[in-house]
Image (cartoon, coloured by chain):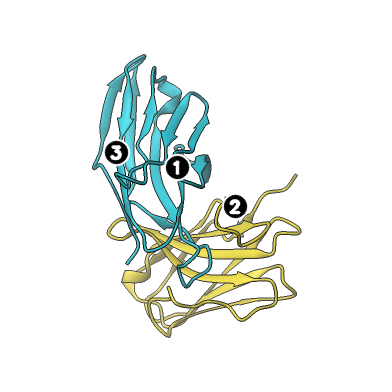
Amino acid sequence: GNSVTQMEGPVTLSEEAFLTINCTYTATGYPSLFWYVQYPGEGLQLLLKATKADDKGSNKGFEATYRKETTSFHLEKGSVQVSDSAVYFCALSDRDYQAGTALIFGKGTTLSVSS
Amino acid sequence: GAGVSQSPSNKVTEKGKDVELRCDPISGHTALYWYRQSLGQGLEFLIYFQGNSAPDKSGLPSDRFSAERTGGSVSTLTIQRTQQEDSAVYLCASSPTSGRGHEQYFGPGTRLTVT
């Protein structure tokens, strides 16, 4: 079945450090891939997305490239800020998935950035 | 504009009681989803509504869970005879369409605690 695996956290970094959060997926069709973020005390919000192979999603300095050959969608940022501290979820939606386009989420990775 | 709203924000109930959770999607969004976020299971899909079509209930964990969507807008998730394992944050999301690449907009969630 379809699934998403992302690296276990927590990830603890100093401000301006480089961030990578790994995400790999298993899907039977041609999924769209997403990164959602949940800031403390707030709801889930879309960070970026990519809908086909080799697409790069980007937002707020974060980037992720849809790699079909490695079934990956790793999240990167060159210089993190304290305000980036949050829980990050990798997710997919697969047009072949019976439940329409419901999202399948990874377990989430907690990022903590200190000044 | 107004986002997805959910009520109540918190609900504490005794084991065995029924509860109703409400979701008001963004006006004009035809797709509506319910998810559950718990420590042990992460984010899980529960049920999906698209327009006036029959809902996809494939994610509901048991027959104690049901949901309806009236007039293609407001949705209510009902849990009968609540159990302690039902304790979680219940999230509602809406989308302008069910297309796989479309962003889902999440509400703040209802935190359910079953004592």
- Give the answer, above or below, for where B75 lies relative to A82: below
Q: In this view, does A97 lie to the left or right of A13?
A: right
Placement of A50 over or under A102, stated as above or below: above
Chain painted in cyan in the figure: A
Q: What percent of the width, then of the height, locates residue A11? A: 26, 32
Residue pictured at 51% horizontal, 42% vertical? A49
Relative to the observer, which residue lies in front, A76 or A32? A32
- Tell me which chain the residue with mark 1 is part of: A
Whether labels 1 and 2 share one chain:
no
Residue A93 left/right relative to B54: left
Chain letter behind tag 3: A
Separation of marks 2 and 3 at Cα, in angstroms: 23 Å
Measure the alpha-carbon separation of dots 1 and 2. Answer: 13 Å
Residue found at x 23% / y 42%: A8
**Amino acid at dot 3:** Asn
A90 versus B29 height, above or below: above
Q: Which residue is drawn at 32% across and 20% down?
A: A18
Report the residue marked by disc 1. Answer: A35
| Mark 3 to mark 1 CA distance (whole Å) | 11 Å
On screen, residue A44 above or below B114: above
The yellow-tinted chain is B
Q: Where is residue A23 in the image (x, y as percent from the top left)?
A: 32, 43
Q: Residue drawn at (49%, 46%), measured in percent from left and top? A: A52
Nearest the viewer among A49 and B95 is: A49
Q: State the SS at label 1.
A: strand
Q: Which mark is residue A22?
A: 3
Q: Of the residues shown, which amino acid type is indicated by label 2?
A: His
What amino acid is labelled 1 in the image? Trp
**Contact flag, marks 2 and 3 (Cβ < 8 Å):** no
Asked if badge 2 and badge 3 are on a common chain, one would say no
Q: How far across and down, in percent of the image, does residue B33 sit?
A: 55, 64
- Camera-nearest residue between B10 and A9: A9
